[in-house]
Image: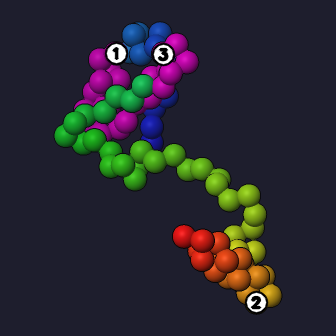
Amino acid sequence: MDTDLTATTFRKTMFKTMDKAIGGEPVTILYRGVPLMLFSKQTAPSKLERAVKRNALVVDPDAIIHTGAELQEELETKWKQEDSHL
């Protein structure tokens, strides 16, 4: 579980916080509105662990998977027309 601290709190608890980071717990320090990560290079989290979950789809995912055959044909026709200009 990540620890979130302000810069002032980090300054007050610096050594305890660094011990947490050494122990493998990533620490986020908010300084001037910018989040900074503190973690041990030996136990650094992977890119996947640092990834931020984002809701990128504006539609229901099932609507994408279960599209109608009519829409599929319409899209493929349009794509073929656009690809013919390449």
Residue 85 image point, x, y percent: 60, 71
Q: Is residue 75 above or below residue 47?
A: below
Name the residue located 52 percent from the left edge and 13 percent from the top edge. Answer: 32
Q: Which mark is residue 14?
A: 1
Q: Nearer the viewer, mark 1 or mark 2?
A: 2
Q: Residues within 10 Å of mark 2 (few under 14, many from 20)?
A: few
Quarter of the rendering occupied by the C terminus: bottom right
Q: Nearer the viewer, mark 1 or mark 3?
A: 3
- Give the residue at mark 2: 69
Q: Residue furthest left?
A: 42
Is residue 33 one of those drawn in magenta?
Answer: yes
Q: Amino acid at mark 3?
A: Tyr
Q: Amino acid at mark 1?
A: Met
SS state under label 1: helix
Q: Which residues are magenta?
A: 14-35
- The answer to which quarter of the image holds residue 74 is bottom right
- The answer to which quarter of the image holds residue 16 is top left
Name the residue located 41 percent from the left edge and 16 percent from the top edge. Answer: 10
Q: Residue furthest front?
A: 85
Q: Earlier in the sequence, mark 1 or mark 2?
A: 1
Quarter of the rendering occupied by the N terminus: top left
